[in-house]
Amino acid sequence: MKFRRRLLGLLQLCAALGAAFNPRVALAYEHPLSEDVVREAYFVGQDVKNVSKFFAQYTQGLPVPPDGPYVAEIALSTPYAQVVEVSARHSVGYSDLQAAEDYGKRGDFIAVRVKVLFTPTYTGRPVDFWRDFSVGLVQKERHMAATSVDSQPIYASNVSGGNWVVGANMSLRFSVVGVESSLVQVEVVPPEGPTVHATFDLKHLR
């Protein structure tokens, strides 16, 4: 019995990895997630050797602007990717049944993380400087506002133990209602400097 369970788990893991990393096999963004899809995402998160490759699809680094704050990184997380993230954080003692239960409690939404750093032309701001930024989703000329916005400051420190704010990681949630399986942009409008866009293709991202 134990052998059969291990074999079934191995087969499920192979199927999940094949779907996650092969664009010809992988399905597009979807919601709500079925039990089988949640189980698939759980196994992707448990594969510690390859899960970073999965997350790389959902994160984009951006160039330093000539002036204004530096929007260094934008990451988008679908309901599927969120199951993978939670599973990856619980590599020991976490089951596919728990992943399904957590998904049910969490519900469906799109999460966006925006990493903003100070620059020589944009520095010395208060801790809540991120409130001056506008972040939204754009799809087929439709602009969508976040349902919630939060942020965590990014600190730098020196050998004497001093620390200071050098930026922030903004965390936003968007409703899945109306978001289609096609190109979607995360638009970041800073108080100074150029507007920044990061495009994600939901036809190829789970």
Image: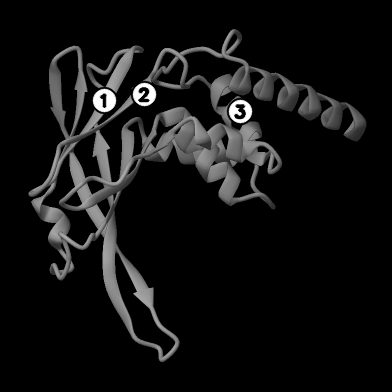
Q: Nearer the viewer, residue 10 or 26?
A: 26
The tag earlier along the polypeptide, 3 or 2, is 3
Determine the residue positioned at 13% across, 23% down.
Answer: 143
Mark 3 vs mark 2, CA separation in Å: 24 Å
Determine the residue positioned at 27% across, 61% down.
Answer: 167
Inspect the image, locate mark 1, and give the three-letter code of the amino acid beneath it. Answer: Gln
Label 2 CA crowd tier, 10 Å (few <14, some 14–19, many 20+): some
Labels 3 & 2 near each other (Cβ < 8 A): no
Mark 1 vs mark 2, CA separation in Å: 6 Å
According to the picture, the residue beneath numbered tag 3 turns out to be 39
Q: From the viewer's perspective, is residue 93 above or below residue 184?
A: below
* Residue 43 coordinates in the image, percent (x, y): 66, 33
The tag earlier along the polypeptide, 1 or 2, is 1
According to the picture, the residue beneath numbered tag 2 turns out to be 200
The tag earlier along the polypeptide, 1 or 3, is 3
* Residue 108 coordinates in the image, percent (x, y): 35, 30
Label 1 CA crowd tier, 10 Å (few <14, some 14–19, many 20+): some
Figure disc tally: 3
According to the picture, the residue beneath numbered tag 1 turns out to be 185
Mark 1 vs mark 3, CA separation in Å: 28 Å
Inspect the image, locate mark 2, and give the three-letter code of the amino acid beneath it. Answer: Phe
Q: Nearer the viewer, residue 147 or 1?
A: 147
SS label for mark 2? strand
Labels 1 & 2 near each other (Cβ < 8 A): yes
